[in-house]
Amino acid sequence: MKTLYLMRHGQTLFNSLGKIQGWCDSPLTEAGKSEAKRARDFFEREGICFDKA
């Protein structure tokens, strides 16, 4: 059996400004960086390693 994890990126500057994005990268806000670190910590704590991304 395989498990599929779906994740959204952390908050970006454009998200916080209400701008539509997709054609360029917008930097993560401090909240977005914190969200990414919490996700990383969850996967490490649960012993989840990815074969592919």
Image (spheres, grey):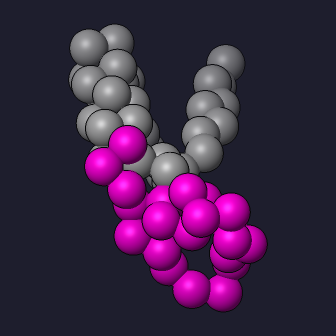
Magenta-colored span:
12-31
Residue at (66%, 87%) from the top-left corner?
23
Of all residues shown, which one is farthest toward the top?
46
Residue at (69%, 71%) from the top-left corner?
19
Between 29 and 7, the residue placed more toward the observer is: 29
Does residue 49 appear in this view?
no
Instruction: Give x and y (percent) for residue 53.
Output: 50, 53
Q: Is residue 14 magenta?
A: yes
Instruction: Give x and y (percent) for residue 3.
Output: 63, 24
Between 34 and 17, the residue placed more toward the observer is: 17
Q: Is residue 37 magenta?
A: no
Residue at (37%, 56%) from the top-left corner?
29
Of all residues shown, which one is farthest toward the front?
17
Between 10 and 18, the residue placed more toward the observer is: 18
Of all residues shown, which one is farthest toward the bottom?
23
Q: Is residue 41 above or below residue 35?
A: above
Residue at (26%, 25%) from the top-left corner?
41
Instruction: Give x and y (percent) for residue 14.
Output: 57, 68
Left/right placement of residue 5 relative to residue 33 reads right
Instruction: Give x and y (percent) for residue 39.
Output: 38, 31
